[in-house]
Image (cartoon, rainbow, N blue to C red):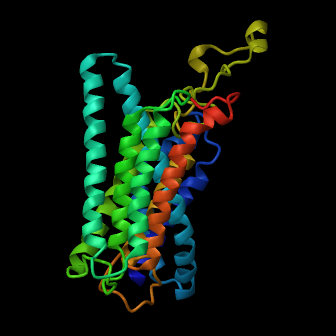
Amino acid sequence: MNAVLRLSLGNFLFFAIFALTMIGVKNQNDRRDAWHHGGWIAKFAIWVVLVVLMFFVPNIVISVYEILSKFGSGLFLLVQVVMLLDFTNNWNDSWVEKDEQKWEIALLVVTVICYLATFAFSGVLFMWFNPSDHDCGLNVFFIVLTMILAFVFAIIALHPQVNGSVMPASVISVYCAYLCYTSLSSEPYDYACNGLHMHPKQVSMSALVLGMLTTVLSVVYSAVRAGSSTTFLSPPSSPRSGARNPLLADSNVEEGKGSSEGSEPRPVSYSYTFFHLIFALASMYSAMLLTGWTSATSDRSELMDVGWTTVWVRICTEWSTAALYIWTLVAPLLFPDRDFS
């Protein structure tokens, strides 16, 4: 596990250094813009050097990084939730804007499938994590709350005063059910209420694979959205940020001081610093997945991503997801004078 943290630290430093060096890049005439998009051989060499050097740093440095990684991983989970909300809203909007019956039917089908999957999966969770011969009140609470949240999402989204849609609510419900499963499956293998304790290593590996898969998808999605979104990751100076301020002040235009269009520096389309920061946080989160959010000196090395720390991190992520989604629905009502588009 110590080697995992050292490798993670090398990755983190690599992306953190780039995040710091890209602060203040506002247009493509900046020399750092070329460094961001090119220099791959040099970047690879720097990455190798950083990773190798991390295997020679004192253990105290790794211990400090391990503590910081817990906070960084929590931040990455929140970023992951924001990306999911962004994805579901854009998915819904893209189909609604087509204004065709077949796409409306598709939205309905996706919504029904997601809700059926949510409640069917919740029933399976009751079977796996609520054995009849044990008192598993905590597990029952987690599962029931997940089902209640699914109803709450739909009720709020369908409220006449809320500008919401039931399709994103259904997708968020499925994701919350998934987080509930990953939380319960991370319970210690000797815990009586963990119905999957007969296959601890298989469950641990499957949870790890799913966690890494969602991490990769989040990072890939952030990269895709960075290059195509009109607002996501975009700095205020970017033409994609939705800013209403013109690139040239009116006074300059009136006085004829504006330069020709060809000589105007083109603003960058997204924040390079935030782009690299996501990768840095993902490096931290990957390390926590592989170490199970426990100390590198822990004796429990045969199982990954298992333990009560992991359970509460996952369940808190589910609740944070629910809170953020509900906030996106009710915020326009609470603050009608602000633009949340």
Q: Nearer the viewer, residue 135 or 172?
A: 135
Quadrant assignment, res 204: bottom left
Question: Image point 40% across, 38% down: which residue?
Answer: 168
Looking at this view, is 132 or 339 the one in front?
Answer: 132
Would you place residue 63 above or below residue 145 in this image? below
Residue 181, placed above or below residue 249: below
Q: Residue furthest bottom?
A: 299
Of residue 77 and residue 130, the one placed in the foreground of this image is 130
Please indicate, yes or no, whether residue 213 appears anywhere in the rendered image. Answer: yes
Image vertical order of residue 280 relative to residue 102, above or below: below
Q: What percent of the width, then of the height, locates residue 46?
A: 45, 63
Name the quadrant of the N terminus. bottom left
Write the residue at 67% across / 29% down. Answer: 336
Image-based side of 210 in relation to 238, left or right:
left
76 with respect to 207 (left or right): right
Residue 110 x %, y %: 27, 36
Image side of residue 305 versus residue 133, left or right: right
Residue at point 62%, 38% (across, down): 331
Measured as percent of width and height from the top left, residue 47 is found at 43, 64
Label tally: 0
The residue depicted at 39 percent of the width and 92 percent of the height is 299
Quarter holding the C terminus? top right
Q: Measured from the top left, where is residue 121 in percent x and y?
A: 27, 57
